Structures are given as structure tokens and as C-alpha cells.
């Protein structure tokens, strides 16, 4: 085996640890439950045990390049503190990096989970071959990541990429961040369910109402299935979601003019239902998109984007992620291959 | 004298040409009328005469580093064609760079005017000492420029930085670009006058109505003076302008987390009237701003920003430009000091 590194995707539900070699081949993947209720020390213990097992198993035959960990929250890159994390409340203001390093006796890199997902798609996924890209991750919330010049764009305080909190409707639905009308309120799984419940109580929306009553796990997925069966109320929800994504992407295309924008996360499975509205908005709203749109944007399918090189006459690509839930794992493994450690422990 | 370069600020009204040395000292500035009505060849002739006079006068005693030209429009960096230019209609799709180079027998750099203004403020103005910054130029329209890693961020097609066409109100006022509710429709001189006329016809707005009737040049400036005299209708217009700027800046702070954002252009003279609303929106809407705001953002005055270094614990600075109408001239001169020419003529 070549040189390898270990990537960790620490989610609120799953804790996944993988050894990945320098070419991006998955050597071994471990999937555990994140036992959030047993506290951060327990989770860190599980994580470090798996890391040590993988580094012990493969570290004799090949050099370990480093360990990268994607964390669902805002990380202070300087201190390694988790500054905000709705899904891991007891990690906030806790020196997670120091605790992990003390157990492992080696340096690790912590990074926001949406940022590592972007890095994964840039390395091996839909944005392969592009130095610059943006990714929106549509899950319970909406995460964002920017890769500029081949590396994660962190900004002055390491807080860049909060694309889910772009204002779409200045007087819109209140968001947990304190703002109103954030993209997250219209393009997350939570938002799809909320919009369905609003449609039920406001317009009746009979098929949605039946599904909500009979399905104990009335979810974005069930609403998507109704949309695919042609239910107009369900379709309207995804069109609105596409409209909001289109507004945000218009702003990004006009301001950054990146070659490619990737949409991932669980809710991106509903691509067919929401993506036509994205392109409609983009054509209408973004002068830079109008000047650079491919003839048939929907025909640019998964992976196809990798064959369209950046450069003069480049067409703006907006496409689905291709690595699915592994994007973050690959991106986390990639961290230690590209990061310059400016500190020793 | 040190090495020097020549910068040109080609505006719809003024054509300014300057020799600037490597340290940023203005050696000589020539100001002409842009004789748009006499056609592009005439304007190019005037421009080239002045460039040749300056390069002849100073080129014997010091090496000329190059010539940079800020143009109000979208430039195709590869071909040197002007792609769009509301103020110079007969320049569109004209190979302006080739025509200028043929006259001068030397290479020149063409760049969007808002981008060169950003570069000027980054080199010698409010964002001095920062490698990363954004600038909004509030004039007849709203221009934008991004400097990342010390150089202009052009994007995949050279069209980045169209910050004036960020959607603020998805169903808002129609914009010339085809979108609705662009920032330009709420934060330009044109927008201020339009909003005043709307207030007159909708609410009466007596002081504004009197001014509009008696003042043949009823302008953003006259409305600003009314606001400063306490007229509530005029004040409301600038508060709304600040709100819209705050919404766009919130998105930029959340997504890019830059250390500094600079607001320039003629309408930025009304800073006192619109800036409080900017900071109000930012605190409410941008979680990244809430985490990085200075204690008293309005106390960060012109030039003061230069003393706040980037780094951990950095505070997000939003401040006025300091170079006034010379920002573009300095930025244009700077172009040939930092640009790598990848072509010969």
C-alpha cells in the first residue's frame, strides 16, 4: 500500500472512521453509532480506539500521513475548540482537539463537516479536476463549503462557508441562527417537512395530510415520493426549495464565478424534483450564469462535470454530489494530505 | 524616481490617466472628459496620447512597469473584449485591448472598474495590510470587487465580483440585468432617487416633493442633505438602503468570512445616514458577524482598519473607502505591478 491517512466523519448519528490511501482508495471503513447520550469522552474513546486499531493494522506496512476529523460545528482552527454544534451540544467550548491528541499522542486536524464534504467531492467526486468549487450539503440543516485554489477556504476566523445561512427571504421563516429566511429554512429535510405541514394546515393538501397521518416518520423522503407520484402540493414544495437554492446559487455565481457548484447531502436525492427550478431561477437572476450556462444544464449528470475543464469559455456547472455519505470521510482523510501543520504537539 | 506604472480610469464621464510609482506615490495625473459621443476611437486616441505623454516624460529616468486600464464593464480577460458596458455602449464586443495595444505598441491590462477600485483600496486604502477583502462601489450602479490572496478574484470566466446583482428582495424592483430585487436597485444613486420619487407619489413626502420640484438636479446628494436635516422620509430611504447592504454583507460575511469589507463610490458619502442600519442587520442576520463583530463597529473609522491585523480573534471590519475617486486610478496602476502577463504582443 501507498502512504495512507485516517479520516473520521463524526455525525450526530454515525461515527465513521476509515483508512484511505494517497490515491483515494478506501482501505478499510469502520461504522459505529455515535453514543451522544453517553457523553463526549465516550465518543472520543470510541473514535480513538478505532483510529488506533486502523493505524496499528496498516501503519507497519505504509506510512501514516495524518488524521483528519470532520465535526458538525464551527471549529476554532487556532485553538481546536468546537465553537458551536447543534448536534453535539456537550462538545461546545470543549477543547476537543487537545483531548483527542492527548489520547492518540499525535496531531490531528479538526474541520467543519460541510467543509470536509466539499473537499471530498473536490478530491474524488463531482468537482474532481477543479481547483475552485462550492458545495451545499442538504441534510437536517444546510451546510456549505468552499474550496478555492485547491484547499478549503476558511476565512479570517475559520468560519467561512456558512452558505445555509444566506438570506433568501428577508422577512421569511425564523432560523435558529437568529436571522429570518435563511436558505436552511427552505432547502433542508426539516424545512421540507415544515413546508408540508404548512401546506396541510393552510391549503388542505389532502395527499400530504393522509401521508402525515398514516406515516409515523413523515419525512422529506415521503414527501419526495408523493411529488414523484405527481401530487401537486408536494411538487410545489420542491419547486419552492429549488427556487430558494437558485436564488442563493445566483448570488454565488455572480459574486464568485466558480467553475462548479456541487449539491449533496441526503435531501439531494430529491434532485429531480427541485433541480429544474434551480436552473430556471439562475437563468433569470444571474447575469454571469446567463453568459456561461451549458446548453442543457440538466444533462450535465453525476461525474460528467469531471470532463469539462475550467478555462476560457468554461460553462458553469451545477451538479449533484457523487460520493454520497462518504464525501466527508474522504475529505477528512484528505485533510492531512494537504494541510500544513503549523504547530507541534 | 522608482519604477512606475501608468493607470487609467475610464469612466463614462471622466477619463483619468496617472503615473504612479512602485510605492504608490502619484507622480502625475491627467483628467480629461470622456468624449463618449465622439466614439470609441476618439476616446482611445485621447487615452493613448496621454499615456504616451506620461511614459515619454518619465520613462527616461525610471523603468515603466506596465499600463493598466479600469473599464466600466465585463471584460473577457482572454480576448480583451468588452462584453458588457452600460456606460460605453459602442465598446461592447469591440476588441478594445487589441486596439489600444496597436496604438501603443505595448501590452496593456484591462480590468473591470470595480475590481481595480478594490485593488486600489487593498493596496493603499482602507484594506491596506489585508490579503483578502471585498469592496462595494456605490455609484450610478453598484459595483463589486473581491481581492483574495492579494490579487483580484476573477473567477472561471473573469466575471466574478458582480456583488451589485445579489438578490435582496426576490420579488423586488426589476433590474436591468434581468433579475428582480438586486442590491443595485436599493443602494445606488439611481435607486435613492427612485425610492424618493416613490415616496413622493405614495406617501406625499412633502420635503422630498418640494426638493424634487425646485431642484432641477434632484439627486441622491440632495436627498442625503434632507436626511441630515432630519427629514424622516429621506432618512427612511437611507435606512432601507442600509438594510439592503446589511443583508448582502451578512451573506458575504457568512460565506467568505473576510477580514474586511470596504464601501466606496460616490454614494458612500451618505455613510452616516445608511451605515447604522448595516450594522443592525449584520448583528441580527449573520452568525459569523455576531461572533466576530468589534465592540463599536461605527468607531472603526476611515483608515483605522489598517491597524487591525488579520489573525485569530480578528474582528470583522466594515468601513468606508479612503481613496475616494482615486481608488480606481491607483488600482489600475497596480495591475501591472502584480499581474503576470501570460502573453506577448
Image (cartoon, coloured by chain):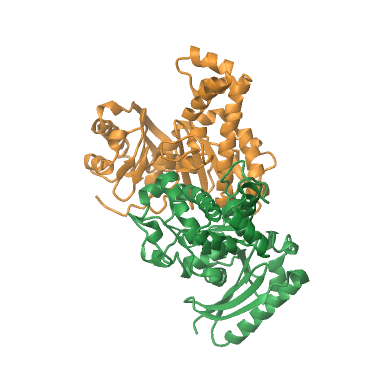
Chain colours: A orange, B green
Of B309 and A34, which appears nearest the observer? B309
Across and down, in percent, residue B251 comes to 49, 47
Q: Position of residue A263 (x, y in %)?
A: 53, 37
* Residue at the extreme top of the image, as rendered: A214
**Which residue appears at 54% of the width and 63% of the height?**
B225
Residue depicted at x 59% and y 45%: A250
Q: Residue at x 69, y 72 (%)?
A: B34
Viewer-side residue, B2 vs B90: B90
Q: Is A13 displayed left or right of B30 in the figure?
A: left
In this rendering, is residue A274 above or below B284?
above
Q: Nearer the viewer, residue B66 or B137?
A: B137
Total tally of numbered discs in the picture: 0
Quick check: A3 above or below B325?
above
Does B157 appear above or below A94?
below
Locate residue A235 relative to residue A75 in the image: left or right. right
Indicate the quadrant containing the N terminus of chain A: top left, top right, bottom left or bottom right.
top left
B141 to the left or right of B298: right
Q: Position of residue A202 (x, y in %)?
A: 55, 22
Q: Residue at x 55, y 71 (%)?
A: B326
Relative to residue B88, is residue B291 depicted above or below? above
Residue B39 visible in this rendered orientation of the protein: no
Q: From the viewer's perspective, is B81 left or right of A246?
A: right
- For the question of whether residue B316 can be seen, the reply is yes
Whole-percent x, y for residue B260 in the image:
44, 58
Task: Answer with the quarter of the image where residue B162 lies.
Answer: bottom right
Amino acid at each position: 500500500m501507498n502512504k495512507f491517512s485516517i479520516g473520521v466523519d463524526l455525525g450526530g448519528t454515525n461515527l465513521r472512521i476509515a483508512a484511505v490511501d494517497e490515491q483515494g482508495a478506501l482501505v478499510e471503513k469502520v461504522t459505529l453509532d455515535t453514543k451522544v447520550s453517553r457523553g463526549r469522552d465516550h465518543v472520543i474513546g470510541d473514535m480513538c480506539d478505532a483510529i488506533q486499531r486502523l493505524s496499528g493494522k496498516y501503519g507497519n506496512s505504509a506510512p501514516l500521513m495524518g488524521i483528519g476529523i470532520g465535526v458538525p460545528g464551527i471549529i476554532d482552527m487556532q485553538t481546536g475548540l468546537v465553537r458551536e454544534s447543534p448536534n453535539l451540544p456537550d462538545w461546545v467550548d470543549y477543547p476537543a482537539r487537545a483531548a483527542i491528541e492527548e489520547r492518540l499522542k499525535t496531531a490531528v486536524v479538526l474541520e467543519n463537516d460541510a467543509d470536509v464534504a466539499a473537499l471530498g467531492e473536490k478530491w474524488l467526486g463531482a468537482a474532481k479536476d477543479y481547483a475552485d468549487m462550492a458545495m451545499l450539503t442538504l441534510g437536517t440543516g444546510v451546510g456549505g463549503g468552499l474550496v478555492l485554489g485547491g484547499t478549503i477556504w476558511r476565512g479570517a476566523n475559520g468560519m467561512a462557508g456558512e452558505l445555509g445561512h444566506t438570506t433568501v427571504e428577508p422577512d421569511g421563516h425564523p432560523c435558529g441562527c437568529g436571522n429570518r429566511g435563511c436558505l436552511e429554512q427552505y432547502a433542508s429535510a426539516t424545512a421540507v417537512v415544515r413546508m408540508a405541514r404548512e401546506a396541510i394546515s393552510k391549503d388542505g393538501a389532502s395527499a400530504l395530510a393522509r401521508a402525515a397521518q398514516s406515516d409515523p416518520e413523515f419525512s422529506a423522503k415521503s414527501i419526495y415520493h408523493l411529488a414523484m407520484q405527481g401530487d401537486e402540493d408536494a411538487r410545489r414544495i420542491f419547486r419552492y426549495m429549488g427556487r430558494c437554492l437558485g436564488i442563493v446559487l445566483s448570488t454565488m455565481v455572480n459574486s464568485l464565478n466558480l467553475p462548479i457548484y456541487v449539491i449533496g447531502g441526503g435531501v439531494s436525492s430529491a434532485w429531480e424534483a427541485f433541480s429544474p427550478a434551480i436552473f430556471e431561477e439562475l437563468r433569470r437572476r444571474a447575469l454571469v450564469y446567463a453568459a456561461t450556462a451549458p446548453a442543457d444544464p440538466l444533462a450535465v449528470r453525476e461525474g460528467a462535470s469531471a470532463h469539462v475543464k475550467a478555462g476560457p469559455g468554461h460553462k458553469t456547472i451545477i451538479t449533484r454530489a457523487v460520493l454520497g455519505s462518504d464525501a466527508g470521510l474522504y475529505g477528512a482523510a484528505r485533510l492531512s494530505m494537504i494541510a500544513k501543520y503549523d504547530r507541534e504537539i
